[in-house]
Amino acid sequence: MRNFILPEGFKDESELMISGEQFHYLRRVLRLREGDELSGTNGKGRSYTLSVGEIRRHSLTLLVTGYQERSVDNCRISLLQCLPKGKKMDLIVRQAAEAGVWRIIPLFSCYSIPRIENAATLERKVSRWRRIIKEALQQSGSLCPTGVVQPVNMEAFVEDKEIQGLKIFFHQEHISRFSLHGLLAPGDRDITLLIGPEGGLAEKEIEFLKGAGFYPVYLGGRVLRSETAALFAVAAVQTILEEKRAWKIAN
């Protein structure tokens, strides 16, 4: 069953009117008819059972027939992604949203191909990424309300923003002995993952991140594309966290 992201401001009404882009999505994309059921989420951990009521030319009514509280992931994963070239960021945003990443912060770094652009161009990109996130959440059913912000300079963000919890950057070479399992074992609520661009991280960036409290983690002997590395890292962290409850101390 497809998942529908309920409009902002929804306050548990028994029915709601849908028009505009959301109407187009339900009527033209999902091809829903009167009486069809679908699930909906409010982005705050509540899941709703919805039924299509009256359909008009440019709008339709959704009837709320039930709801249940669903647990949202206890930890919040932030993805700091150094901007890759072309439209690879679109794929990274989509996959991160599907995987339950809490927020995405695009970064300008030394080897990023895209450079700082004017505010209007950046805002258009962010608007596109937000549309991609919404589509991904509706497809995946993730309850995590993934957010994305305008691209910022790496050093400025790390210095100016207080990043809570565990901070990790991934590297293609063995530059430390930290293991992902070991770092995740304490159970930090907030986890920040940083992925470099196609050209990797500059040596001065590596030293800067270490000084800012980031732990370097080895990604393995394979050279991964930037978009692959992001999914690889998020999936590895999510899998370890999911299986953590089954861990047992060896005798």
Image (spheres, helix red, strand yellow):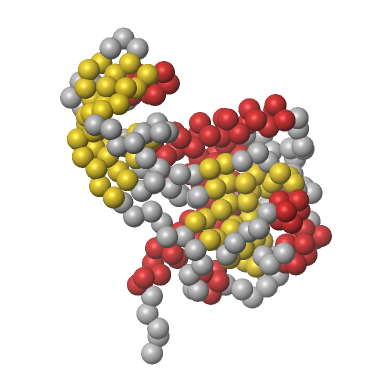
| Of the pair 173 and 7, the residue shown nearer to us | 7
Is 68 drawn above or below residue 206 in the view shown? above
Q: Residue furthest top?
A: 57
Whether residue 222 appears in this view of the structure is no
Q: Residue at x 55, y 71 (%)?
A: 183
Quadrant into which the C terminus falls: bottom left
| Of the pair 35 and 15, the residue shown nearer to us | 15
Q: Quadrant of residue 177?
A: bottom right
Q: Position of residue 115 (x, y in %)?
A: 77, 37
Question: Quick check: 222 left or right of 10?
Answer: right
Q: Position of residue 231 (x, y in %)?
A: 53, 51
Question: Quick check: 119 left or right of 75?
Answer: right
Q: Residue furthest bottom?
A: 251
Q: Position of residue 41 (x, y in %)?
A: 34, 40
Q: Quadrant of residue 84?
A: top right
Q: Residue at x 78, y 65 (%)?
A: 207
Q: Position of residue 109 (x, y in %)?
A: 75, 48
